[in-house]
Amino acid sequence: MKTNAYIYARVSTAEQQKEGFSIQAQLKMLRGYAKKNGFSVVREFVDSETARSTGRTGFNEMLVLLAKKNGCKTILVEKTDRLTRNMKDYLALDLEKTGLEIHFVREGKVMSRHSSPTEFFMQDIEIAQAAYLSRNISSEAKKGMKAKAESGFYPSVAPLGYSNTANSNGIKIIAPDPLVSPMILKMFERYSRGSVPIHMIVQELFDAGVRSKRGNKIGVSTVHKMLSNPIYRGKFIWNGREYQGNHTPIVSAELWFNVQDVLLGRRVSKPKQRYEFSYTGLMQCSECGCAITAERRKNKYTYYHCTEFKGKHGDPYIRQEKLDMQFSHILKGLRIDDRIAKWIVDSVEAKTADKRKTLEETKARLVKQRDRLQRRSDVLYDDRLDGRIDVIVFDRKSAEIRREIELVDEKLSNLDSSYVNDLLSNTKGIIELSQKANRLFLTVSGSEKKQFLKKLLSNCTLDHGTVKPEFTYPLGVLFDTNTKWKASGALSSDLCAVHSYWHPGKESNSKT
């Protein structure tokens, strides 16, 4: 009659089980052992958890079955550290009282109540050694993960929206998942509005096919944790400390902080307006400084007026159509005369050409200086080898040269020619915007008009129905210059102010 037996196999992590580390090999060995020795395998228990701490699922379930009367009393396991790495679990088996028999197949030994005191003593030593090795491995792993975190690399399993990969140097990193990260970004954007509850976002993620690592629907608490996790803005928390990560952020810092405000109740969502007013938030009343608001009448006409928060003063209401005409006229006046535009662009091109030449000359001079220092270092080294100078002199002179080379390298690294090209590009961009501002204004919708004007205007006032604009710098200077040019037909001295914007500290060479 065959003896009933349980098979127990274990790996340390779920990742090892998924990747096939030792589980199948253990089961194959133990099944072969059972067949060869006449055991009838009643059940197999598998754990993918560390044996250093108690509380393993399969192990505990096996203990419950072993405790039953007339039940199976034999365990087949590969070796000691597969069964346990802590004394508490081993004592729970209590071989002397329960009558259990454990076959450690790879080690070629059997432990039972009939084992000698020496065998029990040696087994206790092996378990203590396994516990020590486990603790040591854990300690070294923690050191490695801490060092990795301090270098800016997230040292754990990638959170939802990221995937674990490796960079060109073979270092394990996390990178945005091309399929899931856009949905994570949308989740942050949706919640930042302050009017979308988390349970709705949970359903939206589920409908979009986003699942947890185990393939389940993401819960409300999980989404809440994700929304407050700084890893999505490029930082991460490890062992209670925040680190600056090297990974690519999925959301901007501004968006992340906006979401935190909503989570903490610092931002209350505003009820959605029935109508999108084009010019609210752009103007103040010239009389009292209060904001200009808007209202809809007869479900057809839009009127703008002062909120009169500081008191009534009888400022007239003005229809939106009249404001449309005024803003259009203002933007027409922003169009720079071709002669002025050409003067500005030519001036900047000449200046950038001079600056680029100066940068190239500076770089050539620094490179020449570095080569000279390197030659001095080589000669000094030859003198030391030939015995013409002693160690003390060599060390002192060598340190001086290395310091000079380091200073030159720093100056070379600080040379940046990109801003020269950016200067010319930005100049042309501002002029191009001023040339077509009115045409663009006439083509955009009501809500887009507000965003468009915010880029061009600041602190506009409404004075008894008349808009008095104030352009963002330097468009204001260009507008004033252009107005005077149209009036006088000559280049205004205000061009000096324009020139000083692109060339701080330099005088304009133009003639008025």
Image (cartoon, grey):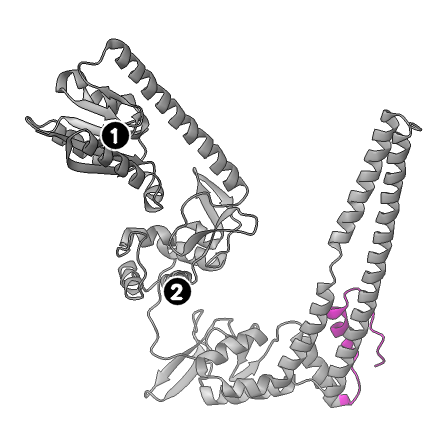
Q: Is residue 441 left or right of residue 220?
A: right
Of badges 2 and 1, the one in the foreground is 1
Write down the quadrant of residue 26 in the picture: top left
Q: Residue furthest front?
A: 36
Callout 2: helix, strand or loop? helix
Q: Residue furthest top?
A: 117
Residue 409 on the magenta span: no
Q: Main secondary structure of the magenta part?
A: loop
Q: Residue at x 30, y 16 (%)?
A: 124
Query: Relative to residue 43, is residue 422 depicted above or below?
Result: below
Write down the quadrant of residue 269 in the picture: bottom left
**Residue carrying label 2:** 186
**Residue carrying label 1:** 77
Q: What is the quadrant of the C terminus in the image?
A: bottom right
Q: Which residues are magenta?
A: 488-512
Q: Which mark is residue 501?
A: none
Residue 229 spot, x, y in % from top left: 40, 50
Q: Residue at x 47, y 81 (%)?
A: 315
